Amino acid sequence: MNEILSAPYVLEYTYTRSTGPVVGRFLENLRYEVLEGVKTADGRVLCPPLEYDEEGEPTTGEFVPLRPSGTVKSWSWVQEPRKGHPFDRPFAWALIQIDGTDNAMVHAVDAGKAKRMKTGMRVRLRWADEKNGTIRDIACFEPIAPFLPGPVHLEYDVNPGKHYTAYLRGLQEGKFIGGRDPEAGKVYVPPRGADPMTGNPTSEYVEVADVGVLTTFTIIRIPFEGQKLTPPYCFGAIVLDGADTPIYHLISGVPHDDIRMGMRVKAKWKPQDEWETSLENILYFEPTGEPDAPFDSYKEHL
Amino acid sequence: MRDVAIVSFSQLPSVKAIEAADEPELVQPVTSDAMKQVGLTQDDIGFTCSGSTDYLPGRPFSFVAAVDGLKAWPPLRESHVEMDGAFALYEAWVRLMHGDIDTALVFSFGKSSLGPVPDVLNLQNDPYYVQPLGLDSISAAALQAQAMIDARKATERDFAEVVARNRKSAADNPNAQIKGDFSVDEMLQEPYISSPLRKSFCPPLSDSAAAIVLAAGDAAKKLVNRPAWIRGFDHRTEPHALGQRDLTTSPSTKLAAEKAGVGQGKVDVAELHAPFAHQEIILREAMGLGDGVSVNPSGGALAANSLMTAGLIRFGEAANRVLSGDADRAVAHTTNGVCLQHNLVAVLEGE
């Protein structure tokens, strides 16, 4: 019975505003994509133009055409815009000093992400598609990137050659294939056309194990452009049993603190029905649990 | 110049929403209490002045209705400012200088809970260049805070430390809304509302009302043992457009503080109306308040922020510390407009 009554209520004023010769000229010109500032008595240029400067002096009425670009003097990133904001996606508010002026304009910057915002950054004006003689005829400003787009796109057909083809075909069948010069006896995985120690062709193919020794490794903790994995992750050099050169792959299935040189590791294969002619058939190498290989047994391969 | 003093102060606790009260219902408890504290009734008051804004309740001329909370017959000498009640206090102080009356009642009320305050405050912005963009009050303050960071005058951690100190001080204030121990590190993990402002760097929105009785000369001495004498009082304003100002400084506060004589003696307590954390840093620098000054022992506007009332409450809190003898010399400050555009500073003294 004593509950307080409550009801929604909307307050609107449908006023129109007269603009006068300074503000009116500026806003009217926006319709035609013309940006102007006004000169003050002491020679400064104000954009947006004012009738009086902060000294109380009337501005001169002399308008100056401006390039539609400027510099951000301060900014605020809005991740979740409010109703009434100029965008319904994340954007920045900014104070923008238009080139050739001495004050700053409040407006929005469509930068996509907060990381692109910085005081001192250069921005260019973007005009609204539909204009009605208000400040919103300027849709927003957008960053001027200090880079030229310079994409290169060339299409090739590549083939890996005879020996690498043998290696990749081996992987498709779940095998590691190496190449050997029968005279020197060294096994190169992947196989090469020649033994670089002798210069002789590696004329024989041999299968090596998918188990081997982790000879060295690194743990990647920093992000970089184009990275496919989320740091931290471990990348290692593995000399497979029967091979004389290492292959490189991810080391996983073990805490990073426990990874060590000499650790015995085994390939973790994808399910067989997903095998292709690719090293990606192996997800990573993981410890076998066998005792570590002594340093002397792999020091030649470092 | 006549000696004029604050002799009593009353406020409603600041809370998120006082639902069961319209304007007269907010005003009556604080005005009657402020007068009762010093044994006065409305008939003894020479001049009554209030500060509020109709945009908070969304009701044009709501301040006229507020008079119903007073005894208004026979008719009152009354005035109103569309500003914080502290500016009504200034008008009453000026009115007392005429010398024909000795007492004044000042009050203000703010119900922030009824409407979208950050959007309502966009109406303070330039109607040609800024208002149509929808610049809410938090985003405007954020442009100022970022300018502070860019100028290397403060860091986000400094902002959080201001908040932690104010809200810790507010723990002893029964009228504060948000108070207690707040972790600086946890505040720094909050998402941004408008960067670099996180929720805690912004004030709460409160409903409240407050009233102060002013008395001049001997009348003040008769009402209380130790009046809080207003020894200096000044307010200054800056250009409206944000793009015409250096937002990292407050020249209007600096000048008002000089004119009010803030630097002419030791300041024991300062109650600063800094709704956003970074603004306290700007105000302290502008007034030259060092580490020895107890700033916002009440918790300030970061702990309780009833719009149009939070400034008058700064005067009441500062005066109470002088009236009680806890402080000999106090500074009270109120701001108005976007990003500290307009600032009012007073010095209150016990002797």
Image (cartoon, rainbow, N blue to C red):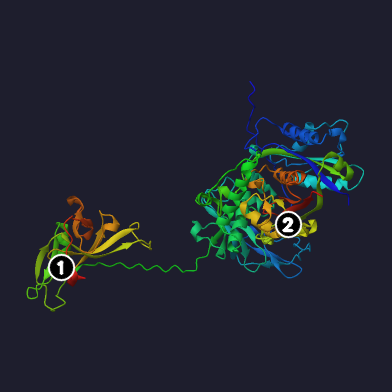
Identity of the residue drawn at 75% across and 64% down? A61
Identity of the residue drawn at 65% across and 23% down? A2
Task: Point out residue B4 in the picture as x, y percentages from the top left corner.
Answer: 84, 47
Using the rendered image of the protein, determine whether residue A27 is visible from the camera's viewpoint. no
Q: Give the camera-side residue of B15 and B60.
A: B15
The residue singled out by tag 2 in the image is B253
Q: Give the camera-side residue of A89 and B2.
A: B2
Task: Point out residue A228 in the picture as x, y percentages from the top left corner.
Answer: 33, 58
Classify residue B288 as left or right of residue B155. Answer: right
Using the rendered image of the protein, determine whether residue A300 is visible from the camera's viewpoint. yes
- In this view, the mark in front (1 or 2): 1
Classify residue B24 as left or right of residue B133. Answer: right
Residue B319 numbered tag: none
Classify residue B44 as left or right of residue B235. Answer: right
Task: Point out residue A40 in the picture as x, y percentages from the top left corner.
Answer: 74, 67
Q: Give the camera-side residue of B316 and A211.
A: B316
Asked where in the image residue B147 lies, by quadrant, the reply is bottom right
Secondary structure found at label 1 = helix
Could you classify mark 2 by the number of other residues whose Cα lies within 10 Å: few (under 14), some (14-19), or many (20 or more)?
A: many
Residue type highlighted by circle 1: Ser
Identity of the residue drawn at 18% across and 50% down? A273
The residue singled out by tag 1 in the image is A297
Secondary structure found at label 2 = helix
Could you classify mark 1 by the number of other residues whose Cα lies within 10 Å: few (under 14), some (14-19), or many (20 or more)?
A: few
